Image: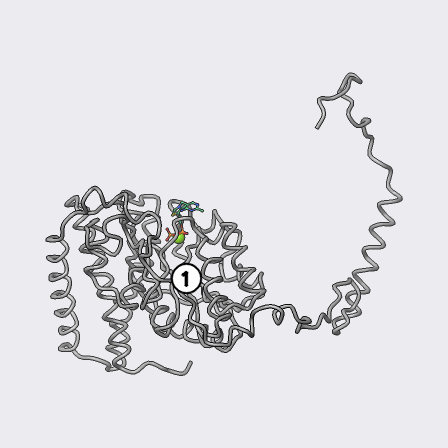
Amino acid sequence: MEQTLTREHQLELYYFMRLNRALEERLEFLVRQNQIVGGLYSSMGQEAISVGSAYALEPGDWIAPMVRNIGALLVRGFKPRDILTQNMGRANSPTHGRDSASHFGDLGARHVVSPISMLGDLIPVMTGVALGARLLGQKRVAMTWIGDGGSSTGAFHEGLNLAATQRAPFVLILENNQWAYSTPVSRQVPIRDLAERGRGYGITSVTVDGNDAIAVFEASRAAVAQCRAGNGPVLIEAKTMRMKGHAQHDPAEYVPKAMHEYWEARDPIVLFEKYLNANNLWDAKAKQEIEARIAALVKEDLEFAENSPMPPPELAEQGVYCEGCHKIEAEWHRPKSEVTPPKSSVEAAWKVKDFGGIEASASGGNGASARAAAKSAQQSAAAAKAAPAPARRPFGRGPKGKRGGGR
Ligand SMILES: Cc1ncc(C[n+]2csc(CCOP(=O)(O)OP(=O)(O)O)c2C)c(N)n1
Ligand SMILES: [Mg+2]
């Protein structure tokens, strides 16, 4: 595939992945120091997915991260101090201490919709965001992430079907990290490649190595371009591994040792370092500079977070309902008259060519196979007629001829 990233871009990808990991390593220490409010859901080993996919978007596009997508938040411009204060429940965190983990967003400049805990629900929501942007005449793409487990929820399937039928400019990154709590993919879904789920809805669906940041970026870039050209949506299955337990409380002893080792040898950051070396994109000095920059930033922001106050108790009763705290206003990029009645109720712009019958469709199709299918259906109907009818008890009668208990 055509290489679209400059050396600076590639070093920036590395920087975000390393910052993602450095932050989560620090958060793990903070859990042990009892400084974290709520659970900590590590994305260790999955950094290439959050960073590589979010990096393919333009500033005006929309994202909705899940808990393992700190990397996407960093790409979107959030600072380590936002993530640290948020996880530590401090008054100056993005949610002012009201919520934890990466449960925050920014409907303003950064275009980040907050996560929804109910798995799958972000799919119809972000499809709606994508459709809303299209209605306003904006050329914007919406992206969210889902796990292998989350891909079995009803909302996943309903949302994806809506996105497909509306050709929404929507990109779904399906992080197949092999586990949903303690359930392996093989015990949850009867298929190996979860991209099949998107194909079932007629959506462009691809599978990529989720531990290869460039592969994730390139697949996402192509998906975003397809959406922007009006030919979306796209599902990208990124194969990876959840390298820690579900959250900090879970030692994940159910994970086979050999499986863990298999993925350990494919660490996305180590792989990317090898790639940068092999392509002479950096040297020891450049690596050292990035490491020093990250260490200084995390240290400074950790001090900031540790010195930040806890929220005052009375804050809990404020801001439950919107009290003019943010202005939500449509940003029209097309004349409103174009989409307001009576124009919206004009004659349908589409044509129905396939009437859906078993015979060859009006738009063409394989007439021979349709006729064969019709013939075989007729034959089974005739065979069913010839077979003796099964013995049946009269409806509503119990074993001794009394009336049954009803239905
Ligand atoms: C609709 C719904 N059902 C159940 C849960 C509880 N739950 C939270 S995380 C999780 C496992 C998710 O697994 P997966 O989607 O593979 O994501 P991963 O944790 O591997 O990133 C479950 C069942 C939930 N949040 N929402
Ligand atoms: Mg999973």
Residue 289 in percent (x, y) is at: 13, 74
Question: Residue at coordinates 53% horizontally, 51% vertically from top-left?
Answer: 190
Q: Nearer the viewer, residue 130 or 118?
A: 130
The quadrant of the picture occupied by the C terminus is top right
> Which colour style is shown?
one colour
Q: Badge 1 is on which residue?
A: 144
Residue 211 in percent (x, y) is at: 34, 65
Q: Nearer the viewer, residue 29 or 232?
A: 232
- The total of numbered circles placed on residues is 1
Q: Would you place residue 170 above or below residue 123 in this image?
A: below
The quadrant of the picture occupied by the N terminus is bottom left
Question: Residue at coordinates 78% horizontally, 16% vertically from top-left?
Answer: 400
In the image, the residue with mark 1 has its CB under 8 Å from the nearest atom of ligand 1: no
Q: Amino acid at mark 1?
A: Thr
Please give left or right for residue 386 compared with residue 22 in the image. Answer: right
Please give left or right for residue 32 compared with residue 195 in the image. Answer: left
10 Å crowding of disc 1: few (<14), some (14-19), many (20+): many
- Residue 401: quadrant of the picture: top right
Q: Would you place residue 325 above or below residue 48 in this image?
A: above
Q: Nearer the viewer, residue 58 or 316?
A: 316
Q: Secondary structure at mark 1?
A: strand
Residue 27 in percent (x, y) is at: 20, 53
- Residue 213: quadrant of the picture: bottom left
Q: Nearer the viewer, residue 7 or 188?
A: 7
Residue 115 in percent (x, y) is at: 37, 55
Q: Would you place residue 395 above or below residue 156 in this image?
A: above
Question: Residue at coordinates 28% horizontally, 57% vertically from top-left?
Answer: 44
